[in-house]
Amino acid sequence: MSALKYLEIDALKRQNKAFKINFKRDIMLAFAKDITQNQPKISKESDEDELKQYMEYQRKLNHERLIYHALDYAKTHLLLNIKKTDGDTRQLGDYLQKAFPISHRFADAETLMILLRKLVNGHSASNNWCRMNAYYHALVFDSMKRFVKIHNQLIQKAPEKAKEYGASEGIEIDFGDWTYLYFPDLDFHIGHDLDYTHYPFAKRNKAIEDEINKKMKTGSSMEDALKSVENQYELDDVTMKVLLGKPINPEDTELFFTSTENPIYEALTETEDGKWGMMDGESLLDHSYYMGSHLKVWEWRKLEEVEAEVEEILNELNKKSSTT
């Protein structure tokens, strides 16, 4: 990691030195799953070694710390760059495009700062879960993707520095897997390529993109094409605005609060009777982890196949060089 990266992280730590975070709060930002639950367990772990390995990885993550530091890092360094560019809109624009590749399209630096402050405050709210819309999901996605990359670099090159964040127990974080488990969708990413590790969302996005492209080839505008698939794919109004590139307005900067007494995650833990391809006695939460583990195993095996192919090619090259 470059000296600049270390300076950036050290600056972040200095600014937060006096702020002791209480990570035993009752409430925070609401994702697709409860981010306060850091020790997930499912019954089939003892039957499948790869599933057990996957769940052991899940239990080494602290989602509250991960989200907090990702958002705070984004906010802190946005402020640093606003000050550093000192009114140079081109230089600041280049930074925004790099640091916030999705969300810079609908918000300028000042607006992004407002949104990040609201997210950080929402992550320490009391008595309420804070629900986010597509504008916020895009910003969280950008912020977390960047921070996870930095975190993983620290794990490799300066593990003691990574340990201070407490986002994981000394392991790299799989951003694709985290996204699959904790984002409700990546609809805000429609029209832009997703990595294969986001496969479940990438498949949905590709289907929507194909439908839109068909409509536009027959002469429909982007807006009309989107409206034609709005109900079929249950695209909400804010997502439609994001996809049409409409700037965020004050109404859309609000976080939506719901009481802690509202059991928003209860449906995930209810056992099912074999619906939707699940086995009897499984919950939606169990099923999501099974799916995640299968995607991860596929990724592991793909890596093994690539490594085996590379090894085979190297062996063949060595044979040829030894006979010439």
Image (cartoon, rainbow, N blue to C red):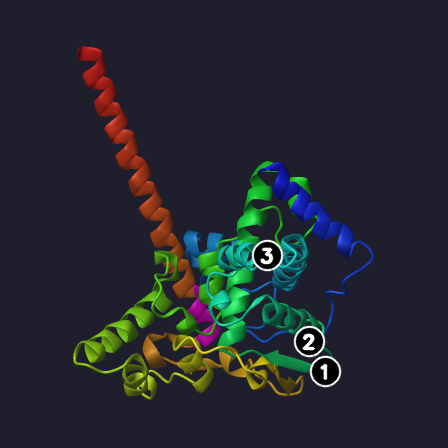
Magenta residues, start to end = 282-289
Instruction: Tell me the distance, in whole angstroms, between the alpha carbons under discs 1 and 2.
Output: 6 Å
- Residue behind mark 3: 88
Label 3: which secondary element: loop
Within the image, what quadrant is residue 259 found in? bottom right
Q: Which percent across, then down, holds residue 273?
A: 39, 82
Q: How crowded is mark 2: few (under 14 residues within 10 Å), some or many (20 or more)?
A: many
Nearest the viewer among 314 and 2 is 2
Magenta segment main secondary structure: helix
* Image quadrant in which you'd find residue 316: top left
Residue at the spot x=63%, y=85% of the render?
A: 257
Specify the amino acid type for callout 1. Asn
Q: Quadrant of the C terminus?
A: top left
Residue bearing mark 1:
127
For marks 1 and 3, the one nearer the N-term is 3
Going by the numbered disc 2, the residue's amino acid type is Ile
- x 24%, y 77%: residue: 211
**Toward the viewer: 93 or 51?**
93
Marking on residue 27:
2
The image shows residue 308 at horizontal and vertical percentages of 29, 36
Identify the residue at image location x=33%, y=71%: 205
Mark nearer the N terminus (2 vs 3): 2
Q: Residues within 10 Å of mark 3 (few under 14, many from 20)?
A: few
Please state if 15 lies on the left or on the right of 167 as rendered: right
Report helix, strand or loop for mark 1: loop
Label 1 with label 3: CB-CB less than 8 Å = no
Q: Does the magenta stretch include residue 162?
A: no
Q: Is mark 2 on a helix, strand or loop?
A: loop
Q: How crowded is mark 1: few (under 14 residues within 10 Å), some or many (20 or more)?
A: some
Kind of residue at badge 3: Asp
Residue 42 seen in render: no
Q: Earlier in the sequence, mark 1 or mark 2?
A: 2
